[in-house]
Amino acid sequence: MSPLPRHRPFLLLCGEQIASSVGRQVTTLALALIAVTRLDAGPFGASALMALSYLPGALLSPFAGLLADRARLRALTVLLTVLQTLVVGSVPLTAALDRLGLPQLYVVATVSGALTSMLAVSLQAALPRVVHPGQLLSANSALTGARTTGQIGGPALGGVLVGLTGASTALLAACAAYGVEALLLLALPAALDTPAERRRPRPGSRTAALRGGLAVVRGERLLRRQVLAGAGFNLGSGAADALFVLYATRDLGLPPWQLGTVYAAFSVATVLGVLLARRFATTTGLAAATRICAVVAALAIFLIPAASLLPAFPALLGYQFVFGLAATVWAISMTTTQQLITPPELQGRVAGVVQAALTATVPVGALGGGALAAWLGNVPVLTGGATVALLAAARLWAR
């Protein structure tokens, strides 16, 4: 068993996480700013953009998990990343031709979300094939730390590029990051191109194969409760996230550099969460770590509507820091629990089922929040979203 710092395939995955997080952070920020500042999207339009980026994950993740168990995994991840580069790169191209509109942004958000979701499921299935089971907690912490390294620079880079060159041009930097990601994935061991499920699938067995992942989630009480709580949490936080850029720029008047700094604060907190996750989860137990951190993360969301009463920039910095710290430890603990429970040949399908359940409520919350905000205003909807997230997190404490 090679130590993780000298484990080449694992180090390649860490590099991939840095590159992918930079690309995704710049993409998310730039698309939202294009919709709000250039194309005059309202609350529902901005929420729809976020909802469409999550909806494919809810629909396709179980099938992506089945594909990850049966396909050549390295080739699959490289293909997904190359397609991501082409899809995101279409925005600056059409902007240069002065043909960019909201319908194209919605298509890009949908396709990019589908590719991101499929890649996330594939990489979750790949990790247990790269490291020893006893290294999974440390490996998940390290990968989260690598991803956070990119997230620290990504929002700040995106904010600076948007301010200097415009949001559509900033997406070229995201495309460059995706290109680096594809090269790192291509360097992974060729053994990953051997399917995890080595039996030849029987005709008509696809439905039964998909049910295998669902059976693991339903049969493991701890995992089932965590997934249900996470889905409810994402319903409330999805409404808050969908309105965040619109609320911060129009209601609170944050300039792009402050918005980028606010997102970067989340990443700094995530680094701290990575450093604390292993010790905290080992000391309290994986289940206790998820319970505690879920409630803390939900409470942090209340700082978003509170920013309308407090100094806005510090309040949003506080939200991102506390939320980032708690959510990171929660995610690491929950992912490690899932991977330890799941049989090797079902890693992709279980990851797909879990991701589908966790992301299905995000577009519902985003669209519902956007529709209600157009009627009630942003602050009441943000407060309601935080309340829903807290109630869902509190369910983890019920007997």
Image (cartoon, rainbow, N blue to C red):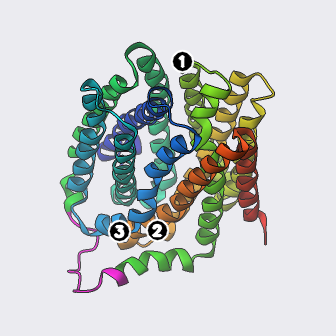
Magenta span of residues: 194-208
Q: Is residue 371 above or below residue 31?
A: below
Circle 2: residue type: Val
Callouts 3 and 2 close, C-beta under 8 Å: no
Residue at (50, 36) in percent of width and height = 41
- Residue position marked by numbered label 1 in the rendering: 257
Check if residue 204 falls in the magenta segment: yes
* CA distance for labels 1 and 3: 39 Å
Q: Is residue 268 visible?
A: yes
Other-residue count near label 3 (Cα within 10 Å), few / some / many at <14 / 14–19 / ≥20: many
Left or right: 96 as drawn, with respect to 397: left
Which secondary structure lies at badge 1?
Answer: helix
Left or right: 192 as drawn, with respect to 251: left
The one nearer the camera, 368 or 53, is 368
- Residue position marked by numbered label 2 in the rendering: 353
Circle 1: residue type: Trp
The one nearer the camera, 282 or 204, is 204
Query: Where is residue 144 shown, x and y percent of the image?
Result: 49, 43
**First of labels 2, 1 by sequence position:** 1
Q: Quadrant of the C terminus?
A: bottom right
Query: Where is residue 189 shown, x and y percent of the image?
Result: 22, 51
Other-residue count near label 2 (Cα within 10 Å), few / some / many at <14 / 14–19 / ≥20: many
Query: Where is residue 183 shown, x and y percent of the image?
Result: 22, 39
